[in-house]
Image (spheres, rainbow, N blue to C red):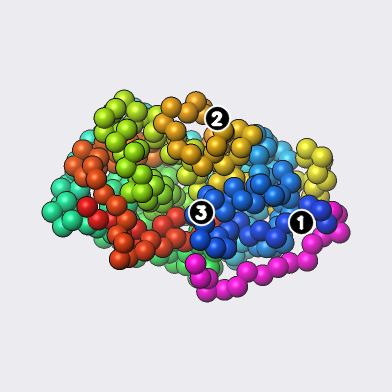
Amino acid sequence: MTFKTPAQKYPVPAHVPPELVVDFDAYRPITGDEQYHEAFLAVRAKAPDIFWSPYNGGHWILTRRDHLSEAFGDYQRFTSTKGASLNPNRPPEAPKLAPIELDPPVQQSFRKLFASAFIVSALKEREKEARALAIELIDGMKPRGGCEFIKDFAQHLPIKIFMRMVDLPEEDRLTLLPLANAQVVADGPKEETIKLLFEYTGRHVMERAARPGQDLISRIATAEIDGRPITQHEAIGLSTLLLIGGLDTVASMMGHIMQFLACSPEHRRQLIEQPALIQPAVEEFLRRFALTNPARGVVEDIDFHGVEMRAGDRVLLSTPLGAVDPAEYVDPLTVDFTRKSGSKTTFGAGPHVCPGSMLARLELKILLEEWLTRIPDFALDPADAPRLKTGVNGSFEHLPLVW
C-alpha cells in the first residue's frame, strides 16, 4: 500500500512516559503483507493496553474493548467537540458535523432529528426496496462471471437506499463519493473537499427549507432545536454528516465481508446449508470487521486506568482494536458464527452509538441472503488484486470477484 503523503512523526509531550510510546500509525497500519485487522492484532500483542502514537498530531490509543466502550460513553472526560477524527482540517468557521462533534445534552437534540428514520418500524419499507435492488444487481451481473464488487454492488445498494432517504439524485453519488472518501482516507484533501460537500449540502438545505418534502434533509432544514428554529449553519453540518456516513460505512463493511467469503468456501457453505446462521453471521461479521477510528479530546487532567492524560490530549477510539481484543474474544481473527459476543464497539457506545446500525444490519443480511442464493461459489480474481484504503476507516476500494 502506498500513500501520497508520508507519515509524519510529532514530538512526544513531556507527560508521556517513553515506555508508553509505540511506533504505530492507526491511519496507516499496514506495513507488510498482512490484512487490515491483522495489523491491529499485531500491535495489540506488543503494545501496552493504552499507548501513545507519535503520528497524526500525537495521541493516545486504547486497545481494550472495555476501555473503548467506557470512553465512548464518557463524554464528561472524553469530548467529541474537538473533531470526530484526529485531523479534521477544517476552517474554524466551518459547520460542526452534528451530532458526532457535539456532546450531550446538545448532541441528543440534534440526534433525535433523524434517529426515528432508522428504527425498525421505519425500515420495513426500506427492506423491500433494498431486497429488490439487491436481486436486480446480482441477477444483472451473474451472467458476466465476475464483477468489481465495490463499484458494481457496494456503491449501489446501501448508497441508493440512502439517497432515497435524503431525496437526492442517485447519479449525484458519482460526484459525492470522492468527496466523502477524502474525509476518511489518510491522504484525503480534507479541507477543499469538505468545502465542496458543504456547498452541495447547503444548496439542498436551502431548497428544502423553502419547499420541504418528506425526506431527511427536509426534516432537518425545517427542524427546531430546543424550541428554536435550526440555523442554516447547523442544518448544513448535520446534513453533511449524513452524506459522509451514508456514502461510506456500510459499503466499506460489505467489502470486508465479501473479501472474507471469497476466500472461505467453508463459511459460505455454512450459511447456504444453515440459513438460520445468517443473522448471527451478520453480528459476527460486524464484530470481526469493525473499521472506524474516531477520535475524542481529553477534557481535563485525568488518570485513566493508570495512565496520566492531560487536558487537550487526543485519544483514538479504534474499533478495529476492540474487534481483535483477545481478552474479550477467544482467537479474535477467527470468524465463528456461533460465537456469543453480544458486546462490541463496532457502532460506538453510549450516547454516540450509530443510529444507522439497524439499517446496516438489514442491508448486510440482505446481501448474504440474496448473493449466496444466486452466486454461492465465488473467489477473488487471481489476475486483479484487491486494493485497500486506510485512514479514519479501513476499507476496500477495489475488490474483483469471479465465479
Task: Give the crowd class for mark 1: few <14, some 14-19, many >=20 residues within 10 Å.
Answer: some
Residue 36, disc = 3
The image quadrant that residue 244 belongs to is bottom left
Q: How many callouts does the rendering have?
A: 3
Tell me the kind of residue under disc 2.
Ser
Of discs 2 and 1, which sits in the foreground?
1
Please report whichever mark, 2 or 1, sits nearer to the chain's N-terminal start: 1
State the residue in front, 384 or 163: 384
Task: Give the crowd class for mark 3: few <14, some 14-19, many >=20 residues within 10 Å.
Answer: many
Residue at the spot 34% in from the left edge and 28% down from the top edge: 277
Task: Give the image location of residue 385, x and y in percent.
Answer: 36, 63
Tell me the kind of residue under disc 1.
Val
Residue at the spot 33% in from the left edge and 49% down from the top edge: 262
Q: Are marks 3 and 2 in contact (CB under 8 Å)?
A: no
Under circle 3, the secondary element is helix
Residue at the spot 80% in from the left edge and 47% down from the top edge: 309
Residue at the spot 76% in from the left edge and 56% down from the top edge: 21
Under circle 2, the secondary element is loop
Under circle 1, the secondary element is loop
Image: magenta residue range: 1-17
Is 34 placed left or right of 135 in the picture?
right
State the residue in front, 336 or 183: 336
Q: Is residue 109 magenta?
A: no
Judge whether 242 appears above or below 196 on screen.
Answer: above
Please report whichever mark, 1 or 3, sits nearer to the chain's N-terminal start: 1
Task: Give the image location of residue 99, x and y in percent.
Answer: 54, 45
State the residue in front, 18 or 169: 18
Q: Which residue, given by chain and number where applicable, does mark 1 sit on?
A: 21
Residue 190, disc = none
Tell me the kind of residue under disc 3.
Tyr
Task: Give the image location of residue 382, x and y in percent.
Answer: 31, 61
Q: Which residue, given by chain and number where applicable, does mark 2 sit on?
A: 343
